Image: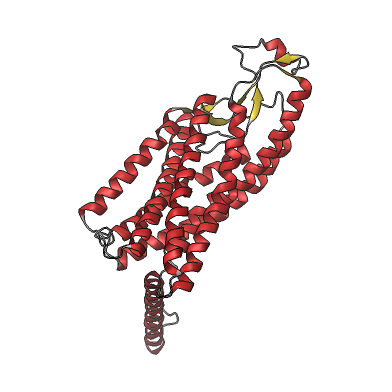
Amino acid sequence: MASTENFTVTVPTSIVHDSTLNTTLDNYSYYNFDNDYDDEVCNRTSVMQFGAIFTPVFFSIVVILSLFGNILVIVILAKYENLKSLTNAFILNLAVSDLFFTAGLPFWAYYHMYGWTLGDPACKIVNFVFSVGFYSSGILLILMTAHRYVAVMNPLSGIVSTTGFYSVLASVVIWAVSVLAASPAFIFTKGQDQNHCVYMSSYWSLWGIYQQNILFIVSSVVFIFCYSQIMCRLLRPTAQRRNKTLKLVFTLMVVFFVGWAPYNIVIFLQSLYFWPKLLADSKTVAGMCDRIEVLDYAFYISRLFAFSHCCLNPVFYVFVGIKFRNHLKRMLKSWGHSNRSIRNRQSRLTITSLTSGDEFSM
């Protein structure tokens, strides 16, 4: 999985003989963390049951909302907007990115309920598609925040009204960087025995964790700097529509940090257990298992908030704008008009059928 999953204590066979495992670390041993479902040392049954119940339900809701919102964004853009605009290019790419991300969620829901039974190729492909959506979404939010900052601070800048070639170039660069960042999820994951879909080693698990942490740190710095500057500008007496915009900016920051900060803190704390440890007795390992259980629960809960971003992005980044709301109203009216036209046409056909003596209407 692109994000870190299920952490259990394992003992590297290169360091400790199998007899050590048979005694369940009654004396002393080296131990290391891996992200599979090995319950030799820590009993994680309750944690796994918790994830198997709540994760599929929540992910199902997120998938439905994300598909509806992001497909609607793409339809409105294609129908009413100029796709050569840099702003619209960002919005279109964000919707596509969220759909990539969403495509992985049903597989993770299935994984939590039944384990990974789809084989090694599917493990690699699903991880890769999910990771591409994850990283492209993060990169796009950074660029959209920077673009919004320039639009507010320097509205006459050429970047604000960029169209054509530069929009295409920006899109190509975004997806190229995202594919590069997601490539370890394709190369270094595998569908293991016992229905696992995980990284091949702790090294690549750490790589995935710290890569996500770095993306969050960069995003946080950009968000704090850009939106704080925007809020300072909007607080000036001469600023127009400042109350509504200030609320939106504040909401964006709160949603971002509430969603992503706990998740990144938890996976960073979990990563500490991936590093090789020195000798530990059974009492130390038992205490460690208790801490791991708390982190596992925190991971499941924080991940639910973090992964819901794919269905929240259309709301906060698209439909809060007057232009897109008007497009949506216009499209809904056109659909309503079409439905009325169909009903009127059916009514006329029914009347004609009755006057001609037919029993059924068309």
166 sits to left or right of 13: left
Q: Which residue occupies 43% across, 37% down?
A: 128
Location of residue 9 in the rendering, given as x and y in whole percent from the top left corner: 66, 25
Q: Is residue 319 left or right of residue 62?
A: left
Q: How is the image coloured?
A: secondary structure
The residue positioned farthest toward the bottom in the image shown: 355
Q: Which residue is the extreme one toward the front?
A: 237
Q: Please name whichever residue, 125 or 83, is drawn nearer the observer in this view of the structure.
A: 83
Question: Which residue occupies 60% across, 52% down?
Answer: 58
Q: How many marks?
A: 0
At which x and y percent is residue 322? 40, 73
Nearest the eye: 320 or 37? 320
Q: Is residue 155 above or below residue 338?
A: above
Q: Quadrant of residue 12?
A: top right
Q: Residue 167: percent from the left, percent from the top?
A: 26, 54
**In this orientation, does residue 303 appear?**
no
Foreground residue among 248 and 227: 227
Residue 310 in the image, given as x and y percentages of width and height: 48, 53
Identify the image quadrant of the C terminus.
bottom left
